[in-house]
Image (cartoon, grey):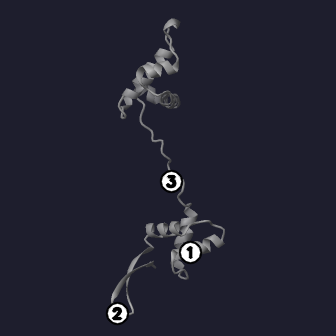
C-alpha cells in the first residue's frame, strides 16, 4: 500500500474493513484486525479514520476521508506571547546591552528563559542583528547588537 492515498481511497478502505466486520453472514464475519490485515491497513489508522468519519457525517456523504494533520498546531516549546512581548519591550527600553542581560533580568522576575531563546525571539522581531561600528583603529567592524 502506498503512503499517499486519495480521500476517496481512504474511504473505500474504511468501508471494506467495516463491511467485513459487519457482514450479514455470521460465518463470513472477520475481526477488525483480520479485516485490516486483508486490506493492508494498520488497525490504528482504521480506528483513527473511522473516528473522523463518525465525527463528520458530511464526509460519509461525500465518500471521502480528508487528510488531517497530526502535528501540533503550535510549537510546544515556543515562548508565550506575553513573554515574547516582554522581551521586545525590554530590548526597546534601553538599559539592556545584550540578550544575556535580558535573560538574567527575566530569570530574576521568575520567568525561566534561556539566553538563546531571548536572542532568537529578538532576531525574529528584527531587534537583534549586525550593525557596523568603527573600531579603535578606525576600521569598520560588524558587531551583533540589540537594534533600537
Is label 1 in a helix, a strand or a loop? helix
Which is nearer the N-term, disc 3 or disc 1? 3
Residue annotated with mark 1: 102
- Return the x and y of residue 136 as percentages of the image width and height: 39, 93
Residue annotated with mark 2: 138
Question: How many numbered marks appear?
Answer: 3
Mark 2 or mark 1, which is nearer to you? 2
Q: Residue furthest bottom?
A: 137
Q: Nearer the viewer, residue 81 or 105?
A: 105
Q: Nearer the viewer, residue 50 or 30?
A: 30
Quarter of image, res 114: bottom right
- Return the x and y of residue 18 as percentages of the image width and height: 48, 19
- Return the x and y of residue 130 as percentages of the image width and height: 39, 77
The structure residue drawn at horizontal position 45% and vertical position 79%, both measured from the top left corner, is 145
Is label 3 in a helix, a strand or a loop? loop
Residue annotated with mark 3: 75
Which is nearer the N-term, disc 3 or disc 2? 3
Instruction: For marks 2 and 1, give the CA distance.
Output: 30 Å
Instruction: For marks 3 and 2, give the CA distance.
Output: 45 Å
The structure residue drawn at horizontal position 36% and vertical position 93%, both measured from the top left corner, is 137
Is label 2 in a helix, a strand or a loop? loop
Question: In the image, is residue 98 above or below residue 36?
Answer: below
Amino acid at each position: 500500500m502506498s503512503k499517499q492515498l486519495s480521500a476517496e481511497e481512504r474511504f473505500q478502505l474504511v468501508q471494506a474493513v467495516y463491511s467485513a466486520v459487519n457482514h450479514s453472514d455470521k460465518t463470513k464475519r472477520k475481526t477488525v484486525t483480520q479485516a485490516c490485515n486483508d486490506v493492508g491497513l494498520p488497525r490504528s489508522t482504521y480506528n483513527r479514520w473511522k473516528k473522523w468519519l463518525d465525527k463528520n457525517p458530511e464526509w460519509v456523504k461525500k465518500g471521502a476521508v480528508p487528510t488531517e494533520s497530526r502535528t501540533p498546531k503550535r510549537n510546544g516549546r515556543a515562548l508565550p506571547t506575553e513573554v515574547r512581548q516582554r522581551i521586545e519591550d525590554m530590548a526597546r527600553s534601553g538599559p539592556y546591552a545584550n540578550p544575556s542581560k535580558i535573560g538574567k533580568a527575566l530569570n530574576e522576575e521568575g520567568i525561566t528563559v534561556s539566553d538563546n531563546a531571548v536572542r532568537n525571539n529578538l532576531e525574529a522581531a528584527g531587534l537583534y542583528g549586525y550593525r557596523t561600528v568603527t573600531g579603535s583603529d578606525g576600521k569598520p567592524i560588524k558587531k551583533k547588537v540589540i537594534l533600537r
